[in-house]
Amino acid sequence: MLVRSCGLAAVVIAVMAGAPAAHAGAVYPIADPDGFYYAPGNLGDSAPGDILRSRMMPSPWPGSTVWQLLFHSTDSRGGPIAAMTTLIMPGGPGPKPLVSYQPFVNSLGLQCAPSHALFDGGLKESAALNLLLARGWAVAVPDHLGPDSAYGAARMGGQITLDGIRAVERFAPAGLGNSPVGLVGYSGGAMATGFAGALAADYAPELNIVGIAQGGVPVNPGKIAIQVGDVPHPLFGLGFAVAIGMEREYPGELPLDRALTPAGFALRDRIANSCVDDIISAGAGHTISEVFHRGMENDPALIAAFHANALEIFPGVPRVPVYEWHGGSDQVPLDLAMATAGRYCAAGTPVLFDIIPGADHGTAILPGAINAYGYLADRFAGRPAPSNCH
């Protein structure tokens, strides 16, 4: 998800009908020209969170030190993948809390990943990172869309987030092995953050996660798509990009070749390596029926894939305190987010749910983030977590 709207309109309505086309199989991004990102041949000999490579990077933040870590993580089926995180260490003595910050990437090209965008000016949330570093906190920014930029595969994003924290804690030069950890993300970044929180107790129980801050969370993109329907939408391209990204992660279950119209193939080819702004521009004003053959909206494989990546449906719950914020006029449905938070409350998780009056998906980011960082500071200090669970 990007700010301002729920641009996932094409996702669940994407259908598995129509004649097979000449374009065979999922369309993957152009390989990164930097060999540092490539998985080693002995990837299977390592475990999730193990560091495969590390390097120091020039720091855009005066007084800080920056490393990039390639590490072992897992895809949606539990298979091994190589993933990346960028660790920013502010100056100053003593132990530091660690924040894993998941940006809203919303892209299909590998050049759009945070590990690139942090250094070329492309990361839209750089100001948020500055606020975290100013508090003296270490910040890890994972490439949570994975090595194929599988936009929409949120559960994998959660696993990459957790394994990235493991890697940072195992990276001796940083000295963060005993640090308390906070998770932060907004919109598309909140999907990965939310899954990391919901998975942590089973997937990475050894991590000392003390708090989660997530905002504008699309807890069920499929329901959002159904609500939008087959009407022109300015952010249609984002929904279409989710279909492409999910096919990359589930190539057997979601063969778009059987679903796309000629216009759909043309749009897929146009945005298959694009970052968010180009995706929005290319897809603006289009509709589902322009790019997909209609007919099999209830395809079981499609539904299963999207349910597996919907926080509303995923049975796991965070076992640490959660601060969640949402604009009162957010285009991402508030009722779905509140219902999911209510389920966490019922399971015993302290949740502080904050509605920003009058704010939409874009304008809710800053006020909620400021509150979120204060909330995490209290968790790092060991103060009791507030809750407005009923």
Image (tube, rainbow, N blue to C red):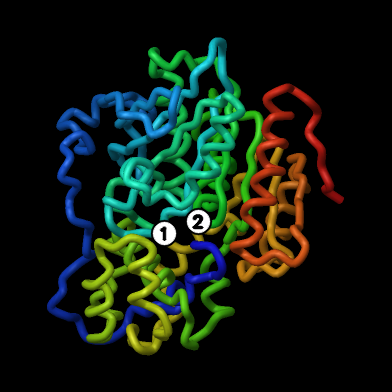
Q: Is residue 56 above or below residue 147?
A: above
Quick check: can you spot residue 77? no
Q: Residues within 10 Å of mark 2 (few under 14, many from 20)?
A: many
The residue positioned 22% from the left and 57% from the top of the image is 29
Left or right? Give the position of 118 relative to 43: right
* Residue sitting at the far front: 62
Left or right? Give the position of 266 relative to 3: left
Seen from the viewer's position, the closer of residues 211 and 339 is 211
Left or right? Give the position of 206 relative to 109: right
- The residue that disc 2 covers is 188
- The residue that disc 1 covers is 106
Seen from the viewer's position, the closer of residues 110 and 264 is 110
The residue positioned 58% from the left and 23% from the top of the image is 97
Q: Position of residue 208 (x, y in %)?
A: 59, 24
Seen from the viewer's position, the closer of residues 37 and 117 is 117
What amino acid is found at the position of numbered circle 2 in the picture?
Gly
* Residue sitting at the far left: 22
Q: Position of residue 374 (x, y in %)?
A: 71, 36
Quick check: can you spot residue 344? yes
The residue positioned 38% from the left and 27% from the top of the image is 66
What amino acid is found at the position of numbered circle 1 in the picture?
Asn
For the residue labelled by badge 1, is the local secondary structure a helix, a strand or a loop?
loop
The span from disc 2 to disc 1 (Cα, nearest Å) is: 7 Å
Q: Position of residue 121 (x, y in %)?
A: 37, 48
The residue positioned 74% from the left and 40% from the top of the image is 349
Q: Is residue 158 above or below residue 260?
A: above
For the residue labelled by badge 2, is the local secondary structure a helix, a strand or a loop?
helix
Please report contact status of discs 2 and 1: CB closer than 8 Å, yes or no: yes
Q: Residues within 10 Å of mark 1 (few under 14, many from 20)?
A: many
Q: Quadrant of residue 372?
A: top right
Q: Position of residue 250 (x, y in %)?
A: 33, 59
| Disc nearer the start of the sequence (2/1) | 1
